Amino acid sequence: MKKIYLLFFFLGLTHLVIAQNTRRVLAPASDHYKSLQAISAAANPQRAWMDTVHYPPAEYGSSFVYMLVKPYYLSDGQVKALSESVKFPANSSDQVRKELDYMLDLQSKRTPEQIKRVEFLGDIGYWPSINMVPSHPSYEENLRNLFFEGRELMGENINAKNFPKISKLLQGVMQDIRIMEFTIKYKLFRPRPYHLEPKLQPLTKINSPSFASGHTLWAFVQAFTWSEVIPERQQDFIALAEEIRRSREIMGIHYPSDNEASRQVSFAMLQYYLKNDAFQNDLKEAVAEWKTVSRKYIR
């Protein structure tokens, strides 16, 4: 009988480990991300002029200052390794040509409702620098944006005031995200899609290089982080992150390869976090807070 109990114990433990590992496995690229990746990323001499195009220095914003900020949970070495782990296809490549054609097709099919939604998503963004100045006119809106994914899925009561431990965790990963985003962007200086394709009519223009997508980076890192806090809602968080990354293509401001690279980097960041004592401690407190406090707001 004792052996049977032990067997059930180890089977249960094995199931738990498998479940945990399954929850943390990055799904392979699918849909147009998968098909586009199969196309040659090498330079095509027939479009050699495209390889002379870089993000215009005249359009740089002030975001490059995040390259001077210290990461929160990541180390400097991890930031460097992650920034060197991805690259974009050559501007003249067949892959980029197909990406641009795909975006032109999206542009031709944009509806008023779709435009309203993607522009709304485009306005979401948390900036660590604003969080340092409580008197800043955008301070409250900035904290509201920090909780966008939780609030979008579970209501207005999911906010920094009600969940300070989760707020601390999200603030930490968002500091890493901004550093990671602009370290990659200002290493590679990829031109935006509308710099290569004059027929593209973006819904806005961005004053930083294209690769990799910052919106997609924060969308997935937050989705992965929220999934550690509330694992039963993982699919919902991932679905929202997917909507956010695709919105950047509909807007005409990011190539699909920008977005897929950001998804890959996001998952790699999670792997570092899971081995980081400070992250694990903050995560433990965030999970405990959620289990205790959420019952007041989630019915």
Image (cartoon, rainbow, N blue to C red):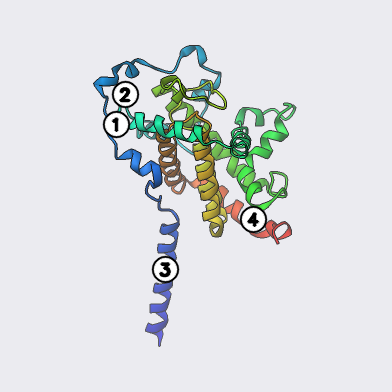
Q: Nearer the viewer, mark 3 or mark 1?
A: 1
CA gap, disc 3 and disc 2: 48 Å
Circles 2, 1 touching at the beta carbon (< 8 Å): no
Which circle marks residue 100 in the picture? none
Dot 2 lies on which element? loop
Q: Residues within 10 Å of mark 1 (few under 14, many from 20)?
A: some
Comparing marks 2 and 4, which lies closer to the viewer? Answer: 2
Residue 48 or residue 234, whichever sits in front: 48
Question: How far apart in space, not on screen, are marks 2 and 4 (Cα)?
Answer: 49 Å
Give the amino acid at mark 4.
Answer: Trp
Q: Measured from the top left, where is residue 133 in percent x and y?
A: 69, 27
* Quarter assignment of residue 258: top left
- The label shown at residue 92 is 2
| Image location of residue 225, percent across then percent down | 53, 48
Callout 3 touching callout 1 (CB < 8 Å): no
Q: Which residue is mark 4?
A: 290
Query: Does any portion of residue 177 appear in the rendered image?
Result: no
Could you classify mark 4 by the number of other residues whose Cα lies within 10 Å: few (under 14), some (14-19), or many (20 or more)? some
- Where residue 166 appears, as percent x and y from the top left, is 62, 47
Q: Earlier in the sequence, mark 3 or mark 2?
A: 3
**Horizontally, is 119 left or right of 235 in the view?**
right
Mark 2 residue crowding within 10 angstroms, few (<14) / some (14–19) / many (20+): many
Q: Which residue is mark 1?
A: 41
Mark 3 = which residue? 15
Name the outermost residue toward the top: 58
